[in-house]
Amino acid sequence: MVKKLITEDTRMFLTGNETIAYAANAAEAEFMYGYPITPQNEIMHTWCKLLPKTEAGFLQTEDEISAGFSTIGGILAGKRAFTATAGPGNVIMQDAQSMAEMMRIPFVCAVMQRGGPSTATVIYAQQETRLTCFGGNGEGFRIVYSTAGHQDLYDYMIKSFNTAWKYRFPTFMLADGYQGKMREPVTLYDPASRGIKMEPTPAVLRAPGKIDVDRKANHIRNTFNLEEELMEVLDSYQAEFDRIAPEIEEYLEYKAEDAEILIIAHGIVARSAMTAVDELRAKGIKAGLFRPITLRPLAVKPLRNAVSRAKQVLFTESANGQLAQMILEKIYGLTTPYSTLFKMGVGVTGDDIVQKVESMVKTPATV
Amino acid sequence: MARTRIVLAGEGGQGVQSIAKILVEAGYEAGKEILYIPNFGVEQRGGVSIAFCQVADEKIGEPRFSKGDIVIMLSDRAIDRCSAYVNENSTVIYDSSVCSTKPTCKAKEIIAVEANKIANEQLSARVFNIIVLGVLLSATNVLKLDDIKNAMEMALGKKFDAKPELRELNYKALEMGMNMIQKAGV
């Protein structure tokens, strides 16, 4: 058993990366596997710095391919294990992440997005949205939480473990370099004090008991001989993913009820949008925000309702419309016109959004 | 809502992030809402290092802002990079003993200080950034000197204990920086 460091509510002034390490410990995570890449290094550093007190484990592998597969190994052995990565590291970890989808392994990974393609910047972006939701040679049987600040990082890191182990789909906490590196106050707590019970983590390999006497054999497949065999399994995964989606979907509306211009943004950009909504409301412009918290699965019904109510929609991202593409497909058939504010690999400020919405009031969108 | 947006920019190695950390730690300890983003490239030294800091009385929304209330520029390249964060409401402070030109951006006020020269001639090159912190303290006027001293103690206390004269040197630098410009709003 690992030792939990946070036993009572504690207010701290931390970076996001530090917050994630503390959250993993609060969730009683036993092992982290990882390979250094900016801007997520301090998750590993903090996790390691705390090891003498937590008595948890850590392995630095030779690359992210190995980090991903090692994480899978730890999980199969019944450890609440996790990893974290970013940018090119996220790219080369896709093979392991796909395997986790195929074998229904409760893989947990924090993604701290940086600019792309390739090495690009070490700073910030929202350009790994599509990759994290749909990467690998599969269908995106993944659960993805997009966070908007340190309290979210703490809350959703803990939640990611439970979601993964309960539903057995790989679960990602999608954050970014700003959230990883920035410092702001955050309240750390023991999950038990919030009524959160950690899901048990039974071993798949070398599980206790004699096969065919005490228990059935655990047979999880990653290889199929026939096309139809594969499709049968994937159809069942899709049906399961659709069935559990309503239990997992999360979103946040901010002054969206009577919004004439609805801003759709996720992650840290949604926070800038909240600043913008307040400024626009003060100027008499009825703006509101719809922020999907789960990007996989998306909360489609509330999203369609919010879009239907609005006169115009604004998509804004630090990417060239990766979320917008996912959403446009889900709101097919609705005719609310939309406009876009995309800054590839660059932060979106409140001012940026205020100016864009003001221009939409003057010249409404026609698309 | 009272919110002060600060852009602090210089060459990597000038100690920009070190003083930003002291500033935000002081703000946090004083009960302010704080948001600090260090902006950096892949280099260990050199390149422009920028700290985006916000100090507010209420919860902060946007992590990045378009224009700073106070923009400090400590090198020629910092002037080039950070003029974009300046508008007619910004106060720009630059080090005229480092920069070869005066910033040409349109600002409320452009103030020259000679932190580098004074550090070298009167104190020590090592406390250049602490002089700048003093300048920043006066320019923002949202934090108390004692808050900053406490935060300095948290960051540098061990070094101070080993060499007490360093504490005096840093306090002196802080004070000289504070006196280089007029306190904001006074």
Image (cartoon, coloured by chain):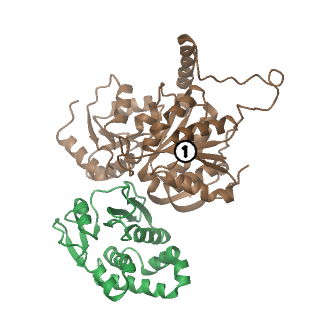
Place of residue A64 in the rendered image (x, y in percent of width and height, measured from the top left): 52, 41
Where A142 falls versus B123 (above or below)? above
| Quarter-of-image position of residue A7 | bottom right
Place of residue B105 in the rendered image (x, y in percent of width and height, measured from the top left): 17, 65
Place of residue B61 in the rendered image (x, y in percent of width and height, measured from the top left): 39, 54
Badge 1: chain ID:
A
Place of residue A359 in the rendered image (x, y in percent of width and height, measured from the top left): 20, 44
The chain that appears green in the image is B
Q: Nearer the viewer, residue A257 or A250?
A: A250
Q: Quadrant of the C terminus of chain A?
A: top left
Residue sitting at x 57%, y 52%: A21
Where A156 falls versus B141 (above or below)? above
Give the residue at mark 1: A62
| Quarter-of-image position of residue B92 | bottom left
What is the secondary structure assignment of the residue under circle 1? Answer: loop
Looking at the picture, which amino acid does disc 1 mark?
A: Glu
